Amino acid sequence: MEEQKEGSLRLLTLNEVKLAKSVFGDSIEYPKVWIHHDSYLPFGLQNKDTAMTPNGELYFRQHYRSDFAVTAPPLQHLFIHEMSHVWQRSRGMNVIARGLMSWAVSYRYSLDGRPVRRYPMEQQAQIIADYFILNAHGYMVWNNLRNSGDITLDGDITEAVIKQQYQKAMQNFPWG
């Protein structure tokens, strides 16, 4: 599929819906989710490296792809992180208000026994995306993404420990 030029938008592909459903089940209204190859902010003020999902729609600039389901794990991680904001908004979270401060918050987290719903917005999205990578691509890919900074878990990162901690944090996810 040919990449679209900036300024375009599209609905999720069937592959992206399948990928997102592997994480969020039927808790998102997928036919209503648009992906923009554009800046959400006026005059192109959205940083080219930054993805934003303030209103239930995803905005990518440099990282836009025509089908995130067939991309490398780092871009799938980004896609699931942004879809987490769609999911949060559908559960009633004011993503725009919380997102205003996203530039100032840490995406880093520790798995300390809390369920994912007890973490702040960006950490929730990170935990969901990080757990997706571990389940979909395995520990080696997860660890490589942690070493590159995409995965933001702090603490003991041995495989057996993190699998148990993620399972506890993600228990009953996605809740309705």
Image (cartoon, helix red, strand yellow):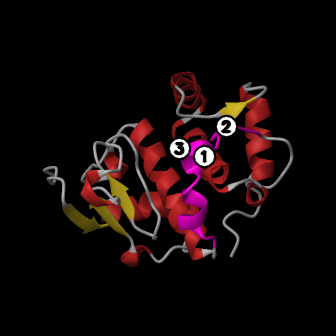
Query: Is there CB contact under 8 Å for labels 2 and 1?
Result: yes
Q: Nearer the N terminus, badge 1 or badge 3?
A: 1
Please state the extent of the stretch shown in magenta in the rendering.
Answer: 93-110
- Residue 41 part of the magenta-drawn span: no
Inter-mark Cα distance, 2 to 1? 8 Å
Number of marks in the rendered image: 3
Q: Secondary structure at mark 1?
A: helix
For this view, does 25 lie left or right of residue 169? left
The amino acid sitting under disc 2 is Arg
For this view, does 82 lie left or right of residue 102? left
On the question of residue 102 being in view, the answer is: yes
Circle 2 packing at 10 Å, graded few (<14), some (14-19), many (20+), is some
For this view, does 7 lie left or right of residue 92? left
Residue at (56% x, 71% y) in the render: 89
Inter-mark Cα distance, 3 to 2? 21 Å
Give the residue at mark 1.
126
On the question of residue 22 being in view, the answer is: no
Give the residue at mark 3.
136
The amino acid sitting under disc 3 is Ala
Q: Position of residue 9 (x, y in %)?
A: 23, 65
Q: Which mark is residue 108?
A: 2
Q: Position of residue 46 (x, y in %)?
A: 35, 50
Res. 165 image quadrant: top right
Q: Secondary structure at mark 3?
A: helix
